[in-house]
């Protein structure tokens, strides 16, 4: 008798979970509506990487406003891991676009918002702060 009660209890819990999931799926706002809840996102500022490492060097090279390729980064630093440092910068909140040229090489560029933040100096640490 207890096995039947336990089985019916599990079935009722499963049914309740399905109904709750359906209710939640229909009541959550869309991603566009969620983004509109943020309003002005100018307060969302990227963080600076630790000074004197290659991630900060990549940010310095991106800060001139031009595009940064793996060849230019290699010539400047001797490292061939630009994509890894771009990944780190994106994780820190920097908005970086990437484009492929006809040879399949990536060229990275800071967004206008990130470039303005970097040049605006709302943080005491600016480009080349370790020099």
Image (cartoon, grey):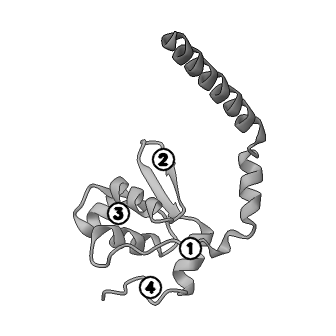
First in sequence: mark 3 vs mark 4 = 3
Label 1 or label 2, whichever lies nearer to me, is 1
Q: Position of residue 95 (x, y in %)?
A: 54, 62
- Tell us which disc is closer to us: 2 or 4: 4
Whether the residues at callouts 1 and 2 have beta carbons within 8 Å, the answer is: no
Q: Earlier in the sequence, mark 3 or mark 1?
A: 1
- Reading the chain from its start, which is encountered first: label 1 or label 2? 1
Between circles 3 and 4, the one closer to the viewer is 4
Q: Which residue is mark 4?
A: 126
Q: CA distance from mark 2 to mark 3?
A: 14 Å
Residue 112 occupies quadrant: bottom right
Contact? badges 3 and 1 (CB < 8 Å): no
Q: Calculate the distance from the C-alpha at mark 1 to the C-alpha at mark 4.
A: 14 Å
Quadrant in which the C terminus appears: bottom left
* Number of the front mark, 3 or 1: 1
Residue 27 coordinates in the image, percent (x, y)? 77, 41
Q: CA distance from mark 3 to mark 1?
A: 27 Å
Q: Residue 45 has which mark?
A: 1
Q: Gap in Å between the C-alphas at discs 3 and 4?
A: 21 Å
Residue found at x 40% / y 56%: 87
Q: Quadrant of residue 116?
A: bottom right
């Amino acid at each position: 008798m207890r096995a039947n009660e336990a089985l019916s209890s599990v079935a009722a819990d499963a049914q309740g979970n399905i109904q709750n999931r359906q209710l939640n799926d229909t009541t959550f706002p869309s991603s566009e509506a969620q983004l509109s809840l943020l309003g002005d996102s100018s307060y969302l500022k990227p963080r600076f990487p630790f000074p004197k490492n290659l991630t900060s060097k990549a940010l310095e090279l991106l800060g001139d406003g031009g595009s940064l390729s793996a060849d230019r980064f290699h010539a400047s630093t001797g490292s061939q891991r630009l994509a890894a440092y771009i990944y780190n910068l994106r994780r820190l909140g920097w908005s970086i676009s990437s484009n492929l040229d006809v040879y399949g090489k990536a060229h990275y560029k800071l967004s206008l918002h990130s470039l303005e933040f970097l040049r605006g100096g709302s943080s005491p640490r600016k480009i080349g702060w370790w020099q």
